[in-house]
């Protein structure tokens, strides 16, 4: 049978995602108690990075190491991918030597092609279209602080980027309402909006979008690869800064999240990200625990189907 992959949140069922979050919280409690179950003993994760990252690399490496496995970091300088080898050839060979592959790249089509030819599970650690691993951590963080996210109002403010797309998939899978506030020319892809069914609403004004929200999330205005647009985007997004005035329109107990790195004074004010409603540091830590649960799920599923 073909391996299970995690390229978007739609690759797992709603029940599987709920079970995964419960397991992530359990693994976190065990970690805090100094217990590290050796669930990845003799397992190897290959990590292909075409886009650099701090949190993604550290969280996946630490997850494998703490639970008895190992991870190898592969940059474009370290693989034949950087020298023009076809993606499908690399997928065939690499997946014959390791137990799981994590890919962080630009075009989403790249990881889809890799997964098509891989013999082992492939995890999307970020593409230009989706960032599903981050949403696992986000949902875990909300549940730890406020309980079930089902039926809640979540607000996304800023660029209609890969994080925005993943929040739309999360709204569908975890059954919450998502209000998206973006400038008209930076709205999310229409086909992703269509896939979110009736869970997402689009706004160009952040005020109605954030009013009554249970959770407010944002991201940098210029993502990796968009640095040349930085000056223009700062002007366009100026009124989309998540500051104390905007947060005051959300519910009094609303949480603030940011996937990091953050630019204080741009997409978020310092008093918000460093304030009492911010849970960004736990959100970042939870990448470790939710990804342990994800790796465990995929590796167990792979073992059963072999």
Image (spheres, helix red, strand yellow):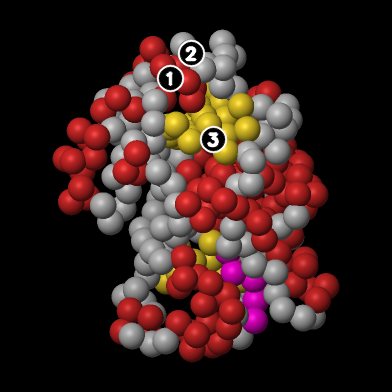
Residue pictured at 20% horizontal, 33% vertical: 235
Q: Residue 92 at what x, y percent from top left? A: 56, 87
**The C terminus: image quadrant:** bottom right
| Whether label 2 touches label 1, CB < 8 Å | yes
Reading the image, the residue beneath label 2 is 249
Q: Which of marks 2 and 1 is nearer the N terminus?
A: 1
Mark toward the viewer: 2 or 1: 1
Quadrant of the image for the N terminus?
bottom right
Q: Real-space Cα distance between discs 2 and 1? A: 7 Å
Looking at this rendering, what residue extends furthest in the right direction? 304
Which residue occupies the foreground of this view, 212 or 252? 212
Left or right position of 107 against 132: left
Q: Mark 3 points at which residue?
A: 201
Identify which residue is drawn at 34% across, 73% down.
76
- CA gap, disc 1 to disc 3? 13 Å
Closer to the camera in the image, 69 or 108: 108
Query: How many residues crowd mark 2 within 10 Å: few (<14), some (14–19), many (20+)?
Result: some
User: Which one is nearer the viewer's eye here, 45 or 248?
Assistant: 248
Residue under pointer 1: 207
């Amino acid at each position: 049978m073909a391996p299970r992959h995690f390229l978007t949140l739609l690759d797992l069922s709603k029940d599987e995602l709920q079970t995964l979050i419960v397991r992530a919280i359990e693994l976190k409690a065990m970690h805090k108690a100094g217990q590290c179950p050796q669930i990845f003993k003799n397992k190897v994760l290959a990590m292909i990075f075409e886009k650099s990252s701090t949190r993604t690399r550290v969280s996946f490496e630490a997850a494998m190491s703490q639970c008895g496995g190992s991870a190898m970091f592969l940059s474009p300088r370290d693989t034949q991918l950087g020298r023009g080898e076809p993606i499908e050839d690399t997928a065939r060979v690499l997946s014959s030597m390791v137990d799981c592959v994590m890919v962080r790249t630009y075009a989403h089509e790249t990881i889809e092609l890799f997964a098509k030819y891989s013999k082992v599970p492939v995890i999307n650690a970020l593409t230009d279209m989706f960032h599903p691993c981050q949403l696992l951590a986000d949902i875990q963080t909300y549940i730890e602080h406020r309980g079930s996210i089902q039926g809640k109002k979540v607000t996304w403010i800023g660029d209609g980027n890969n994080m925005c797309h993943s929040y739309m998939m999360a709204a569908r899978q975890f059954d919450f309402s998502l209000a998206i506030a973006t400038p008209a020319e930076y709205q999310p892809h229409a086909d992703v909006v269509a896939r979110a069914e009736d869970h997402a609403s689009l706004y160009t004004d952040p005020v109605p979008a954030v009013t009554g929200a249970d959770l407010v999330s944002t991201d940098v205005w210029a993502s990796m690869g968009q640095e040349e647009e930085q000056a223009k985007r700062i002007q366009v997004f100026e009124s989309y800064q998540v500051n104390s005035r905007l947060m005051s329109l959300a519910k009094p107990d609303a949480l603030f999240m940011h996937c990091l790195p953050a630019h204080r004074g741009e997409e978020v004010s310092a008093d918000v990200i460093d304030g009492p409603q911010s849970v960004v540091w736990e959100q970042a830590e939870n990448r470790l625990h939710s990804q342990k649960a994800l790796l465990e799920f995929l590796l167990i599923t792979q073992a059963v189907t072999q």
